């Protein structure tokens, strides 16, 4: 288990605040900041999840609950009929996002927006979001991070042209969000609405030959 580097400043800040309040005000007064410190340590956790590399499958890009599965025409990156799996992340889920497959980042887009609850259907169009398109030479997918009502920052640790490995952490969304995985229509979806999934562990789909 690791702590995401983006959480160090918040955790250390609340730890110092807790110690200061404890010193000047006593244990009873320090309970609330101590609980918040514990929550931030929990929130910014990054479990070690080694996994076998398999080009025929797509792993979940996030922990959470499958909100919807739909078919549509993707005109952003794939430019073809596609399938989309939307995953809702509560504040208690691991918020690190992982690459569903290995490949090169051929597309990247950040869009400013609002902060509707991530479970709202319109959040995909209204909220702040960040998309990356992966290409492994034989298949392409699009992964979209979408901010939620509590989220105020989408973090990305990758840039255009970078090669990522399947299961590699590439970013996170702070405090409640959703993640969308857009893939070719030929992919066989192996999850259903309401399923609990784990990033880099749950197989979302299998690419049919």
Image (cartoon, rainbow, N blue to C red):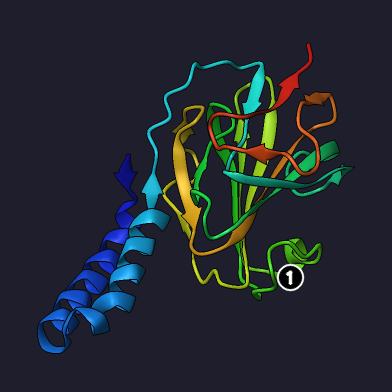
Query: In the rendered image of this protein, does residue 123 appear above or below residue 171?
Result: below
Q: Say which of 73 and 13 sits in front.
A: 13
Q: Outermost residue, bottom direction?
A: 25
Q: Outermost residue, left direction?
A: 23
- Residue pointed to by mark 1: 126
Q: Tell me which residue sits at (65%, 73%) in the image.
A: 113
Figure quadrant of residue 136:
top right
Left or right, 79 with respect to 30, comes to right
Q: Tell me which residue sits at (19%, 78%) in the image.
A: 27
x and y, in percent, of residue 20 in the image: 14, 81
Q: Tell me which residue sits at (53%, 31%) in the image.
A: 200
Query: In the rendered image of this protein, does residue 53 appear above or below residue 72?
Result: above
Query: In the rendered image of this protein, does residue 80 appear above or below residue 147?
Result: above
Q: Quarter of the image for the N terminus: give it.
A: top left
Left or right, 194 with respect to 149, comes to right
x and y, in percent, of residue 123 in the image: 74, 66
Left or right, 84 with respect to 113, comes to right
Figure quadrant of residue 182:
top right
Query: In the rendered image of this protein, does residue 81 appear above or below residue 93?
Result: above
x and y, in percent, of residue 68 in the image: 81, 47
Q: Tell me which residue sits at (52%, 56%) in the image.
A: 92
Q: Say which of 115 and 72 sits in front.
A: 115
x and y, in percent, of residue 122 in the image: 80, 66
Dot 1: element: helix
Q: Outermost residue, front direction?
A: 28
Q: Quarter of the image for the C terminus: give it.
A: top right
Figure quadrant of residue 11:
bottom left
Counting other residues with Cα less than 10 Å from the Cα at mark 1, is it few (<14), some (14-19), or many (20 or more)? some
Left or right, 153 with respect to 120, comes to left
């Amino acid at each position: 288990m690791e702590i995401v580097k983006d959480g160090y400043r918040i955790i250390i800040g609340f730890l110092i605040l807790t110690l200061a309040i404890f010193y000047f005000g006593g244990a009873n007064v320090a309970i609330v900041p101590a609980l918040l410190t514990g929550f931030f340590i929990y929130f910014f956790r990054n479990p070690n999840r080694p996994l076998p590399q398999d080009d025929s499958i797509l792993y979940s890009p996030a922990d959470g609950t499958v909100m919807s599965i739909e078919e549509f025409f993707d005109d952003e990156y794939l430019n073809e009929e596609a399938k989309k799996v939307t995953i809702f992340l509560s504040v208690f889920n691991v918020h690190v996002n992982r690459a569903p497959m290995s490949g090169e980042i051929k597309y990247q887009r950040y869009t400013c927006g609002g902060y509707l609850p991530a479970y709202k259907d319109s959040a995909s169009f209204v909220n702040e979001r960040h998309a990356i398109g992966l290409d492994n030479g034989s298949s392409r997918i699009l992964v979209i991070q979408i901010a939620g009502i509590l989220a105020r920052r989408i973090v990305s640790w990758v840039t255009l042209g970078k090669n990522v490995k399947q299961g590699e952490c590439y970013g996170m969304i702070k405090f409640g969000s959703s993640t969308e995985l857009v893939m070719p229509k030929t992919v066989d979806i192996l999850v259903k609405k309401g399923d609990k999934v784990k990033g880099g562990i749950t197989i979302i789909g299998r690419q049919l030959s």
